Image: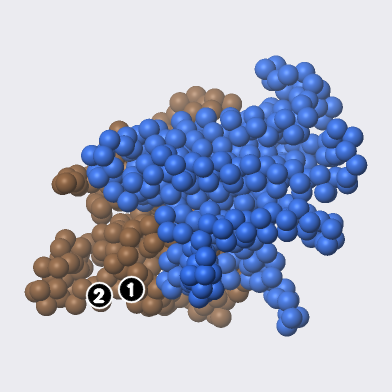
Chain colours: A brown, B blue
Amino acid sequence: MTPPLAFVWSEFAQQVTSGLAAGAIYASLALALVLIYQTTNVVNFAQGEMATFTTYIAWTIMNHGVAYWPAFVLTLLIAFGGGVTIERVLIRPVEHRPELVIVILTIGMLIAINGLTGWIFGPEVKAFDSPFPNRSVIVGGVAISIQDIGTFCICLGTVVVLWLFFRFTTLGLAMRSVAFNPDASRLMGVRVGWMLALGWGFAAALGAVAGMMAAPTVFLDPDMMLVVLIYAFAAAVLGGIDSPVGAVVGGLTLGVVINLLGSYVNFVGQELRLPTALAVLLLVLVIRPTGLFGRVVVRRV
Amino acid sequence: MRRWAPPALQGLVLAGAVVLIVLLPRFTSEFRLGQFTYVGIYFIALLGLNILTGYNGQISLGHAAFMAIGGYTAAILILGQKGFELAGQHPSHVLPEHGMRPLFTIPIAGLVTGVIGYLFGIPALRLAAVSLALATLAVAVSLPALAKRFEHLTGGGGGLSLPLPHTPFGWNISTPHWLYYEAWATAAILFVVAWLLVRGRVGRAWRAIRDGEIAAVSSGVSPAVYKTLAFGISAAYAGVAGALFAIQVSYINPDTFPVTLSILLLASVVIGGLSSLSGVIVGALVLEFLPIYAQTPPVVHLNFAKQAGPVVFGVVLMVIVLLVPGGMASLIRRLTRPVTAALARKA
């Protein structure tokens, strides 16, 4: 355990920036969860495993000599296709069944994809290249790693692109209308089924971004996203499970808070970060079940 | 509850199962016997999980964490202060000086885990199905970290080694046999308890809450009371299973009850059949044997990677969810209907 540190501003600012980078990864995955929650009304437990699998695909593509960014884009396309396929083949048949059934189906996917990843790519830990140099820039006496800046920008950049898509395109409008009221959308001629599939596709692509950004620091192994997934869940719940803005704010907040607690509170340290995130999750759920930005659902009898 | 067979036939099948379990050790090797001991242990954990998820509709992805709590409770009590000192560790002083007999730690482990589960059930009341699944998964993921952190009680990452189990009371059977009968006798008692609970007033309340909370409230059933009760009892079952597990392997560390086990427990309950006590035995057999046979399928003599287990497990779960929502229990019921119907007509 590290001895208590004297409080230094630059140190603090550094912890905040690296927290923001980690938080951006949680935010992407949290947003993926929210996208699926909004359309399918369940939490996709396989989200992390889907992200891991696509990150392995990126690794394979790069191993065949493709440069980072083309491989990145190719992986996003493959992830998108995979997400759409999963919705069409597996989720479609249970669409109108109780929530519990769909949740259990995604748990089945979690188990199967996790096993498949280990089976195809081997269980050993692999290094995953980062597209950013392993240096720091000094801004106002604070050393900020370029990798953190890059991770932050890529994750939030994807989120912004997605937001622009939902806000300013007809397809985006159609998808939002399906999330808001599927029956009315169907009557207006929106192909609801395909909108749901697109939602899964976007979620899978977002997950792939999160996976590829997380992999250089956590290293590539079949279980790498499990912990990230828990953080993403906590972030989504913190922000309100049906609010995209909430997911992003929740992810960033969680990243910073966990990082600060880990470095400044001795009791928390490295090991207890996850239980701390869990405590945050439980606290929010108990005090404010709808999260910070969530819609209050009024139940009528 | 729909009966799948006339009561007389049900009794006959149950009696047959008991005879089979009692006589099984005569026909199997010691290695197989160990596997069937694990089936008994999983049977107990799955009974508890089915009470919570099947009968009460509360999902838990954290039952391995409750097993771990039970396992650690038993291990710490078995060692006592002396045991810790022998292992070169400094235990906290709240422990009794001498270790306890493993058998007696089982109910205590169940009780401790039950109380913890009951307490966890209180915040869980505020959680909808999905958030509850997340919260319990988070418990399962963070428990190993907690176990490593509180080293003086849990032995940290190195875990706790227990004295090798042996047959107590000077009974004249081998230790593997004793462990087998210990697990299955506990399983039998807990099966009867679960059956009595489920068929009576409490079970009716649980199912009423599962099928419609508002309707249950308006019939005078308090969800708070019965949901926390289900959580407590379910956790107690898991705790007993965890204690038996720790005694069986005479060792426990933070990885003895991994997150994967939590997830597979839920999967097995669904494969066996939600809200079916007889399905639980199928679930327990699946949990123990499916990963083994997926890796080295019998008859065809193939040898797959270890990961074949989870892949097949996940696929089986998905197929069950998609095609046979009632699980194996309902499948068996459907397949045997011609026979049972004929018998019912005769009776």
Find out whether the residues at labels 2 and 1 contact each other: C-beta distance under 8 Å.
Answer: yes
Q: Residue A250: which quarter of the image?
A: top left
Q: Tell me residue B58's x, y (percent).
A: 41, 47
The chain ID associated with circle 2 is A
Residue B237 lies left or right of residue A257; in this view the side is right
Q: Tell me residue A127's x, y (percent).
A: 59, 63
Residue B79 lies left or right of residue B46; in this view the side is right
**Can you say whether B113 is above or below B338 in the image?**
above
> Which residue is pictured at 72% across the width and 30% down the height?
B104
Q: Toward the viewer: B15 or A96?
A: B15
Please tell me how crowded label 2 is: few (under 14), some (14-19), or many (20+) other residues with Cα within 10 Å. some
> Which residue is pictured at 78% across the width and 25% down the height?
B99
Q: Which residue is mark 1?
A: A92
> Which residue is pictured at 35% across the width and 69% down the height?
A94
As measured in the structure, the alpha-carbon distance from the residue carrying label 2 to the one carrying label 1 is: 8 Å
**Can you say whether B81 is above or below B222 in the image?**
above
Amino acid type at circle 1 is Arg
Q: Which residue is mark 2?
A: A193
Q: Residue A139: which quarter of the image?
A: top left
The chain ID associated with circle 1 is A
Q: Quadrant of the N terminus of chain A?
A: top right
> Is the residue at mark 2 from the same chain as the one at mark 1?
yes
Amino acid type at circle 2 is Gly
